[in-house]
Amino acid sequence: MWYKILEQSRLQGEEIESINMSNILLHHLTFLYGEDNASPILDRVQAILADHRPRLSPRDSGLSQRDSLLILYGDQVQEPNAKPLQTLKKFCDEYLTDVVGGIHILPFYPWTSDDGFSVVDYRQIDSSLGDWDDISAMQNFRLMFDAVINHISSKSDWFQKFLQDDPRYKDYFITVEGEPDLSKVVRPRALPLLTSFQTPSGEKKAWTTFSADQIDLNFKNPEVLLEVLDILLLYAERGADFIRLDAIAYLWKEIGTTCIHLPQTHAVVQFLRAALNEVAPRVHLITETNVPHVDNISYFGDGTNEAQLVYNFALPPLTLHAFHTGDARVLSEWAKTLTLPSDQTTFFNFLASHDGIGLNPARGILTGEEIDALVNKTLAHGGLISYKHNADGTQSPYEMNINYFDALSNPNANESLDLQVDRFIAAQAIMLSLVGVPGIYFHSLFGSRGWNEGVKQTGRNRTINREKCQFDELQSQLADENSLRSKVFTRYSQLLKARSTTSAFHPHGTQTVLNLYPSVFAIERVSPDEKFHALCLHNVSEDRVSFTTKFKSAYDLLAEQEIQISTITLEPYQVLWLKIKE
């Protein structure tokens, strides 16, 4: 009899939880679409959830220190007469097993521009890459999919039907009539905000935040939100453990405002989080907002209701500044402010990605002169600079387009390759040491330099960091222990393996930034159960430094040996990760 009582209690608990979740969803829908519309929309939401529920996996959704994500394109590694996704799986199985825990495959849907970020059909795989079975075959790694939901390709079926005055798609996109004042709108790129298109009913000016081929979706129309919900649930069915909300900050538009970080945008994120919690709680949302740090972390919400992870966008430029100046103090003081609103959230830390190194996140942390110094160093190292429009009509540097290896070490400098690798690995080790989940761009893990020839081919600055590789050439380079690729991959793998076996690096652990020496970024990490402590030391300068610590002895996680650490000497760009013995 007792088990029947327990079963009844469990069912009642699930019913109560379901009612609470319905109330949360209704609250967000009421805020977005009004009280009269919210209940009918909720009925449709519940129908979508019910349709997907039987096909969703209840796999464990927890994070651990073993979680790290390699960021790459679906055709990043290629070989003749093979589908790229199949080649990618073969490559990842051979080289990445026990090195990274997951893979972020950048948009693999049919597309027309922006290297995948102008999506034609969210529910299909680009046939030139492979198919959904090829994605499923990679689930020995945790997978991150992109939800490019701020905009869609002008060649998409949705927009083409809009251009034909199909009544279903009439309000799927944002059109602007007359000449309203749009001067407050924050722009990420120096391109026109509106693009004109001809339709049977006349010329329409569509909102195009990023380019004329990327048409912004109109979330004021609840049909769009319902479509997006169905798409995200499809991604969960297809194996996504993480869903990246691309350019999410620009989602909702209100003429007369900045059209960035609006309350309605946060409400949409909260709605999607609540819906996924209902049927796919293992899925983690990651918001991609290349904006100043205080705005970026606002997408944690209250710590329970928005993104579980946010991109730590200030980290790449601040780390670069530390190595350019040989002084870690600005980076250290900023890192001391990295607090999390709950143990359900953490940072997505990265130094490089398919895009450039954003400058806006560093504004307010670095001075104007320090940002100018980063720009000038990038240009001196053979990189490029992308600009954005300001409200006053001027332009300012928005992004440094350069491979992170080149950003740290001038390709034309007369210094040893080993020193350049030491400098690069020290920067990556800082990123890996911080609380959060690390995201490692393919070209960082495999020691790539800038691809200037690609920029000449495409005319786009970001191509400098988007070169694709041939499988046989990559294998040959990795087999040569004297090559740059082999040196970087070997050292980087050592860091990742040490991190994955040390619970002090748990994404929900704690960290304390220490002031031990001006040129040393020092951080103490503690596991969530407080049983394991790690001291991570990184010399950002070309000078040998010595200092004392409060600790006596430790286990060197990289050299795998016991050492005495009451006095520590660090060689130029040396990394020392220590398991502390109290």
Image (tube, rainbow, N blue to C red):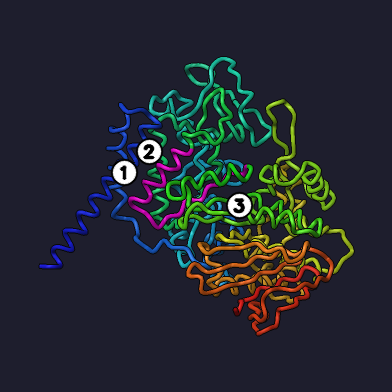
Please tell me how crowded label 2 is: few (under 14), some (14-19), or many (20+) other residues with Cα within 10 Å.
some
232 relative to 425, above or below: above
Return the x and y of residue 307 as percentages of the image width and height: 48, 49
What residue lies at 37% left-to-right and 38% top-to-bottom? 226
- Give yes or no for residue 131 being in the magenta stretch: no
Which residue is tagged 3? Answer: 312
As drawn, the label of residue 451 is: none
The answer to whether residue 374 shows anywhere in this view is yes
Q: Secondary structure at mark 3?
A: loop
Residue sticking out furthest to the left: 1
Residues in magenta?
Answer: 266-291
Q: Disc 2 residue type?
A: Leu
Q: Nearer the viewer, mark 3 or mark 1?
A: 3
Q: Are marks 1 and 2 in contact (CB under 8 Å)?
A: yes
The answer to whether residue 78 shows anywhere in this view is no
What residue lies at 61% left-to-right and 23% top-to-bottom? 182
Location of residue 289 (image quadrant): top right
Which residue is tagged 1? Answer: 48
Instruction: Name the residue nearer the viewer: 237 or 518.
Output: 518
Please tell me how crowded label 3 is: few (under 14), some (14-19), or many (20+) other residues with Cα within 10 Å.
many
Return the x and y of residue 465 as percentages of the image width and height: 70, 53
Q: Is residue 52 left or right of residue 349?
A: left
Q: Disc 3 residue type?
A: Asn
Q: Earlier in the sequence, mark 3 or mark 1?
A: 1
